[in-house]
Image (cartoon, rainbow, N blue to C red):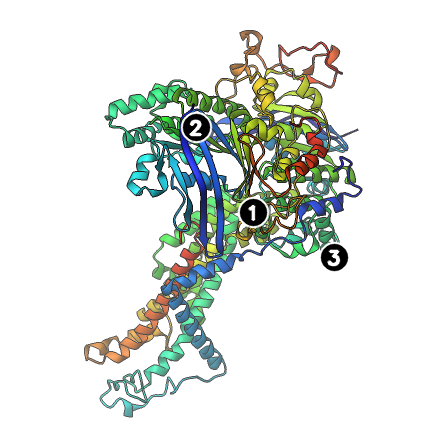
Amino acid sequence: MSDQKPRDAVSQQADVAGGERVGRKPLGLWADTWRRLRRNKLAVAGLCIITVFMAVGLTQEVASLAGTYLAPHDPNAVNYELSPDGYGSSPSWSHPFGTDYLGRDIFSRTLVATRISLLVGVIAVSIALAIGLTLGPVAGYYGRWVDSVIMRLADIFFAYPYILFVLLLLTVLGPGFVNVFIAIGLLSWAQYARINRGSVLSVKAMEYIEAARAQGANDVRIIFRHVLPNTMAPVYVAVAMGVGGAIVTEAALSFLGIGIQPPDASWGKMIADYLPYLQGGRWWMEVFPSAALTLTVFGFISFGNGLRDATDPRLKE
Amino acid sequence: MAERLLEVRDLSTHFFTHAGVVRAVNGVSFTLDRGETLGIVGESGSGKTVAALSLMRLVPDPPGKVVAGDILLKSKDLSRLNEEEIRQVRGNDIAMIFQDPMTSLNPVFKVGDQIVEAIRLHQNKGKKEAWRQAAELLAKVGIPDAEHRVDQYPHEFSGGMRQRAMIAMAISCNPDVLIADEPTTALDVTIQAQIIEVVREMQQQYHSGVILITHDLGVVAEMSDKIMVMYGGRTVEYGSVDEIFYDPHHPYTWGLLSSLPRLDLVEKTRLTPIKGNPPDLLLLPLGCPFSGRCPYERSECRDNWPTGEMVGMSHGVHCWIPAEERKNIRSKLPRFRRRVA
Amino acid sequence: MSLLEVSSLKKYFPIRTGLLRRTTGHVYAVDDISFSLEQGKTLGLVGESGCGKSTAARVVLRLLTATDGQVVFDGQDVMQASRGAMQRLRRDMQIIFQDPYSSLNPRMRVRDIVSEPLLNHQIGTEAERKRRAFELLETVGLSAEHGERYPHEFSGGQRQRIGIARALALNPRLIICDEPVSALDVSIRAQVINLLEDLQDEFGLTYLFIAHDLSVVKHISDRVAVMYLGKIVEVAGSDVLYDYPQHPYTEALLSAVPIPDPETERARRRIILEGDVPSPAKPPTGCVFHPRCPRFRPDPCARAMPPLQSTGGDAGANHLVACYFPTRYEEAPG
C-alpha cells in the first residue's frame, strides 16, 4: 500500500466505493405499504368494493355519453303493468331488486345511478385537491401571515354549515347536474389543505429543500417538485375518505331535493323518493339503493383506514 | 482476584423479518469482571447494541429473538428467567445508559420522578426517602444545585446534564453491571470529557463493571481495559486495550486504525480507508462477514467462519490468515511502521 | 488572492413570544466574525453546538439573510447582489450537507438529483444534462447505472457521494462542507475525506469545512478558525493550532478530544471545563468565554470582548487570538 496520491482520482474512488453493485434492491416504498395492506382483510374488502364500484360507474358513464345504458332494463322505462297497485312489485327473477311505483326496474336504476356517485367522487375531489394542494403547500412553505390567512380561510370553510354553503353556491351557480359536484368540491378543499400543510411543515425542515435553494431553484419549483411529492402519503388516505364523503354528501343533497333533479337518478334521490313506500311494507325500493350507497361508502372508508395504517411508519406489525 | 460478574457464551440474536432473517448477533462471547471496563467497538450493523440489549432481554420480540447462548450474571442464567424475574434484574443488577439523552427521559415527568421511580421499583423506600436519595444522586453525578434540579423537567436540563441524570438513574440501585450505549456520541466534545469522568468516578465508587459500546476509538482507548471488536454480528478480535491498539491481528482492526485522522501526529499523509460499504445484514455470508471488503481475503473466508485463535494471554482473533503472515502484512502498513509489538 | 472575504458578519434571530409575537430578545448566533479564504485552500471552522458555525455558512451562501456585515466573493458583494447576480453567484458557491438521509429528495432518481442544478440554471439540453450526471457520478466513485436508482437504495456513504456529485454539477469554485462526515461510519469517513481531497486537487476547489471533530478538521484544513458562542476566538494554521494553541478554549477543546492511542491517553493532562455552554440568547457580557475560563480576571475579561488579533512577535501575523491572556510560546513558528 503506498502513500502516493493516485494517478487519477476517478479510478481510485471507483475502486474504493465498491461501485459495481449497489446491493440487493430493497423493496420500494409502495411495495412495503401494499404488503401491509394485504394483511388487513377489511381494507382488502374495501378495495374490492371500490374496484367493482369504479368499473360499474365507468361503464355506465361511457354508456350514458353514448346515449344509452348498460342494464337489463331501461332504467327510465315506465311500465304500469309491473306496478298494478302503484306500489311496484317485489323482487323476482326478471327483476332481482323489484320495481318501483312506476314499474321501473330498480336493479337497472341502481346500476345506472352508480355513475352519478362516481362522477361526484371524481369531480368533487379533483376540484378540492386542485385548490387544497395549491393552498396547503403555499401556506406551509411560506408560513407566517400567508399561513395564517390561508388557514383561517380553511377554518371558515370548516366551520360554516356545509349544506347552507352548498345551497348558497347553487343559487349562484344555478341548479344543474355538474354544478352540484363543483359546489361540493369547492367547499371541501380545506381538509386536504390542512392535512397537506402538516406534512409540508416537516418536509420543509429537510436538508434537500435547503439543497434545492442553494442550487438556485425558485420557490415554485421547490414547492411542486420537492415539497409536494413528499407530502402526498396522508393525502391519499384523505382522498379515499373524501370520495366516500363526497358520495354521501351528494346523496344527502339529493335526498333534500337540492341535488340531482329528475329524470337523472342518483342513489340519494332514489332513497328520498322511495322512503314513503317503506311504510306500506314495500321495502325493496328503499333497501337496495341504500345498501348500494352504504356498501360503497363503507368500501372507501375501510380502504382509507387500511391505507392509513399501512403507511404509518410507527405502527408495529 | 476480581469477581466475575458476567459471562456470556455464544450469544446469538436474530430478527425474523418478512424480508429474511437478520443475524444481528452471531455467536458472541465475552466476560466482565468487577471494576473492569469492556469496550465493544463496531460500526452500524456490527450488532453491538443488539448484543447489549440481549443481555437484559430488551430486544423487541417479535421480530427479534435470542436464539442461542448463555448469559450468566454472577452464575445466574438470565436467559432462563421469566418476565417477572428479568424485570427484577433490569435496573437493579444491570443498568443501561442510552445514547440520546433527549429522548431517553420522559418530557412530561420531572427528573426527580423518573429517578424515584427507578429507586422505588427495586428498593423498599418511602417517597420522601427516595426523593432525598434522588437529589443525592444528582449531586453525586456533578449536577450543581441538585436540591432544586431534582424538581425540574428534562427540557430545563442541557444535553450534558440530561446524560448525567441518566447516569444517576442507572446507578440508583447500585447495579453490578453498567451498560453505556454510545453515551457520548450525541454530546459536544467538552461535555463528552465530563461525562467520561462521571462514569469513571461512579465505577470506582460502586465497584461496578462497565460495558462501553461505541464506535469512537478515542473514547474506547481512554476508558476501556479490554476491547471486543465486532463486525457484521460477529466478534472478529478481542483483547486488552493495549493489545488491540498496538498488536492488532485482524484486517478489520487494521483498517479501522489506519483510517482515523489523528490529532496528535504530525504527518499529513493520506488516510487509508476500508473500501466498500458496511455489510447488508440480510445477506451475510456464512463465513467471515468482512469478506468482500477484506484486502487479504482468501478462498475459504466467505464460507467458513474462522475458528478462534489465541495470539496472546487474553488476546484472540478469528481470521484464516496464519499469524506469521499477518504480522508480515501488518508490518508493511504505514500506520504500524512505528509501533509493533 | 482571497476568494472569500467575510467582514464583521452578524446574524441575530429574533425571539418572539407572547400573543402579539413581540420581539423579546435575540439569539446571537453569529456575532461579528471576520475571516478570509484563499483560492484552492481549506479553512476549517470548528466549535461545539450553538457556536454559530452552521449559521455562518448559511449566511455566506445567503440562504439566510445577514443582520449585518459583508461577504465578498471573488470581488462581488454577496449581500447586495441582485437576483440575477445572485443566481450567477450560486453557480460558484455550493454546499454539502451533514445528513445523507435527509439531503436527498427520496422521490427523485439519483440522476435527476445530480443534474437538477443544471436544470435550475437552464444549462444544456436534457440529453446533455443526463450525460453530465453520469459523468459526475463516476467522478465520485459511483457508476452510471446508479443514476436510475432512488436514494433509499444506497448506504450513507454512497448517499454522501451523491450529494457531493450534486454540489459539483455547476463547477463551483467554493464548496461549503457542513459536517460532511459526522453522520457516517468511521470506516467510511476516510473514503469521503479522501474523495474531497482528491476533488480539491483535481478541480482546484476551495473549501470551507465545518465540523466539530477536530481530528478530521486538522487533517483536511490548511487553516482553522475556532468559534465559541458566535465569535471566532482563534485562527491559525492547522498544525500551529494544535501544537501552539493560545486561547484557553482551544486548549480545553484540544485536550477533550479522545485520542485513539491508550498510552497517549494515559499520559494526558485533561482540562475539564466547568459547566455548560451558555445559551446564545443570553451571551455573557465582556468576553463570551469568561464564565468558564480558567484564566478569568474580572478586569478586563468581564468588561469587553477582546479583539481578534495577532499576539505579534514569534507567533506571527497568521495566528490570531481573541484573549487578554493568550498562552505565549517561546519556540512557536511564524
Of the pair C173 and B319, the residue shown nearer to us: B319
Rounded to the nearest angstrom, the CA distance separating label 2 from label 3 is 67 Å
User: For mark 1, what is the residue?
Assistant: B305
Of the pair A281 and C315, the residue shown nearer to us: C315
Of tags 1 and 3, the one toward the viewer is 1
Rounded to the nearest angstrom, the CA distance separating label 1 from label 2 is 28 Å
Quadrant containing the N terminus of chain A is: top right
- Going by the numbered disc 3, the residue's amino acid type is Thr
| Among the two numbered marks 1 and 2 on one chain, the one whose residue lies closer to the N terminus | 2
| Residue B314 visible, this orientation | yes
So how many labels did they put on this image? 3
Of the pair C161 and C68, the residue shown nearer to us: C161
User: For mark 2, what is the residue?
Assistant: B33
For label 1, the SS is: loop
Query: In the figure, B80 relative to A240: above or below?
Result: above
Give the image quarter of residue A175.
Answer: bottom left
- Going by the numbered disc 2, the residue's amino acid type is Asp
Question: What is the crowding at mark 2: few (fewer than 14 residues within 10 Å), some, or many (at least 20)?
Answer: many
- Disc ID at residue C125: 3
Of tags 2 and 3, the one toward the viewer is 2
Q: Are marks 1 and 2 on the same chain?
A: yes
Residue C18 lies left or right of residue B260; in this view the side is left
Residue B64 lies left or right of residue C111; in this view the side is left
Label 1 resides on the chain identified as B
